[in-house]
Image: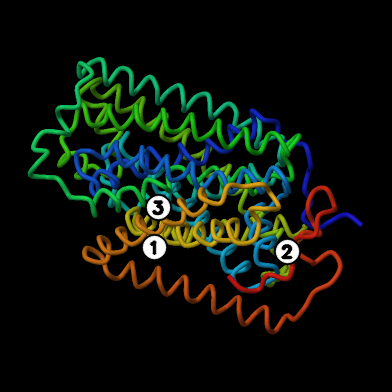
């Protein structure tokens, strides 16, 4: 019997998978986060991107080892289920990742609206921002309905356009500035936020790289997944760290740190103005539109499949509400509704803060599961996930302290969100009871084999 999740094994090539991963990372990382990271980390904000890349590389190791051994659509849920069995931590950790990705979608959508309005010199506080964000979310939904081949083609074209465009922006800006970082570094001592500020910036910068998990979530649909999932993650991370550093230095070469903070929601467009004038702003906005649109498209693709997998694993409830189609189409609708709601009611800074907290908590659970339960099974070196846990925890604590001082409400909301997800899943799994057959964790992987370890109920 055909699964209602309607996976299409082997439909994503290596290049298509890399395009999908970079689509999510570059879409959110550069355009949405550069100014906010500079606000936290200060004039040396490019260093935050480097440290975040190192931490993301440590985290990616565990994902790659497990995904190479056991690729599947909904990969993060499968990693958690192999480590912890059908437990609250598996379900809650998976949902933290889902919400982190949906939050990222709303972040990218609002960034699309903010940059688009720069073409008309409209402030980023305009009510048009959420309207444009909603329009992009709906458009990405329609493309996702069209199927994997359309997504792969669009992602490849968009990846070439945006990476090429961003490199042109960075090159021209750096050349005009004489390859100098003097603007942002001016007044370095007086504006230095200290180690805590740098670490808080690192926590936010990690969001710029977490798009590699999109590849893990779609592992069951990657061609030759045992080889290509890991390769795609490594290639995507390598591309992104180079692009991020070039852009960070380009922004810092034309804008002071105070100017970057003032224009934090559209820092790249503002950085293009001194180097290239209004034409440069228009060019940068056009690239931002392509990058954010493709990022949202790729993220919707991955989230809908992860939710479908969680439904198959009986880790979350599902209701059709009279809608036609299968589970994948329904989860796509739910994702669009939640992302659209967040895009309307939260600004970029708060969206990013919640997403960072959710993601780091989830990643700590993943890394502990790899170290405690899976390292022998997947032949992983134990010190690497431990190093990732320590790095995640230090960055998370610094971020909570800094944001708690500046915006305590968002820390309360994020903490309440984490607690609510764990509480809901604990109650649901208790009421739902044990499952059998195709609803067992691991039963729906793309190979149809490989039951995960189901006896790990404790951390």
Sequence order check, earlier mark of 3 and 1: 1
Q: Residues within 10 Å of mark 3 (few under 14, many from 20)?
A: many
Residue 240 or residue 387, whichever sits in front? 387
Residue 184: image quadrant is: top left
Mark 2 closeness class: few <14, some 14–19, many ≥20 residues within 10 Å: few
Q: Secondary structure at mark 3?
A: helix
Position of the N terminus by quadrant: bottom right
At x 36% / y 52%, what residue is drawn?
203
Residue 244, placed above or below residue 382: above
Task: Answer with left or right where residue 262 lies relative to residue 341.
Answer: left
Q: Tell me whether the residue at label 3 lies in contact with that at label 2, contact meaning CB atoms closer than 8 angstroms.
A: no
Where residue 4 appears, as percent x and y from the top left, is 81, 58
Q: Which residue is mark 3?
A: 391
CB within 8 Å, label 1 to label 2: no
Q: Marks 3/2: CA distance? A: 44 Å
Q: Which mark is residue 152?
A: none
The residue where tag 2 is placed is: 323
Q: Earlier in the sequence, mark 3 or mark 2?
A: 2
Is 395 displayed left or right of 16 in the figure? left
How far across and down, in percent of the image, does residue 371 sit? 58, 57
Q: Quadrant of residue 281?
A: top left
- The image shows residue 130 at horizontal and vertical percentages of 40, 53
Numbered disc 2: secondary structure: loop
Q: How many marks do you count on the picture?
A: 3
The residue identified by callout 1 is 345
- Could you say whether the residue bearing mark 1 is in a helix, strand or loop? helix
Q: Percent position (x, y) of residue 38?
A: 25, 43
Which residue occupies 8% across, 37% down? 187
């Amino acid at each position: 019997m055909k699964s209602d999740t309607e996976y299409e094994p082997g439909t994503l090539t290596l290049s298509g998978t890399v395009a999908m991963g970079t689509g999510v990372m570059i879409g959110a990382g550069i355009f949405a986060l550069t100014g906010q990271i500079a606000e936290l980390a200060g004039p040396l904000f490019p260093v935050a991107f480097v440290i975040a890349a190192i931490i993301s590389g440590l985290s990616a190791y565990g994902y790659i080892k497990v995904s190479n051994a056991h690729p599947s659509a909904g990969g993060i849920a499968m990693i958690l289920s192999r480590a912890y069995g059908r437990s609250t931590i598996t379900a809650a950790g998976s949902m933290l990742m889902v919400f982190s990705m949906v939050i990222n979608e709303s972040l990218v959508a609002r960034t699309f609206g903010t940059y688009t309005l720069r073409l008309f010199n409209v402030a980023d506080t305009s009510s048009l921002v959420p309207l444009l964000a909603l329009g992009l979310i709906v458009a990405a939904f329609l493309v996702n309905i069209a199927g994997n081949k359309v997504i792969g083609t669009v992602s490849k074209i968009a990846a070439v356009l945006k990476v090429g465009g961003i490199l042109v922006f960075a090159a021209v800006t750096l050349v005009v500035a004489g390859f100098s970082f003097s603007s942002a570094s001016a007044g370095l001592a007086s504006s230095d936020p200290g180690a805590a500020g740098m670490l808080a910036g690192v926590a936010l910068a990690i969001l710029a790289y977490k798009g590699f998990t999109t590849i893990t979530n779609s592992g069951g649909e990657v061609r030759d997944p045992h080889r290509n999932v890991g390769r795609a993650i490594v290639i995507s991370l390598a591309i992104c760290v180079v692009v991020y550093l070039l852009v960070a230095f380009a922004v810092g070469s034309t804008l002071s740190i105070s100017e970057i903070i003032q224009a934090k929601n559209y820092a790249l467009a503002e950085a293009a103005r001194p180097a290239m004038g209004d034409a440069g702003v228009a060019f940068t906005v056009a690239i931002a539109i392509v990058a954010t649109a493709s990022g949202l498209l790729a993220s919707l693709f991955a989230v809908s499949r992860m939710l479908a997998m969680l439904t198959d694993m009986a880790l979350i409830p599902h209701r059709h509400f009279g809608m036609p189609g299968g589970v994948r189409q329904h989860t796509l609708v739910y994702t669009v509704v939640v992302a659209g709601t967040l895009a309307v009611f939260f600004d970029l800074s708060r969206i990013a803060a919640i997403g960072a907290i959710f993601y780091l908590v989830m990643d700590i659970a993943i890394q502990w599961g790899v170290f405690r339960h899976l390292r022998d099974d997947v032949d992983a070196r134990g010190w690497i996930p431990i190093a990732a846990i320590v790095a995640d925890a230090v960055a998370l604590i610094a971020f909570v302290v800094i944001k708690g001082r500046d915006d305590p409400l968002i820390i309360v909301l994020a903490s309440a969100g984490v607690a609510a997800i764990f509480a809901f899943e604990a109650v649901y799994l208790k009421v739902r009871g044990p499952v059998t057959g195709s609803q067992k964790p691991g039963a729906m992987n793309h190979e149809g084999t490989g039951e995960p370890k189901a006896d790990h109920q404790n951390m």
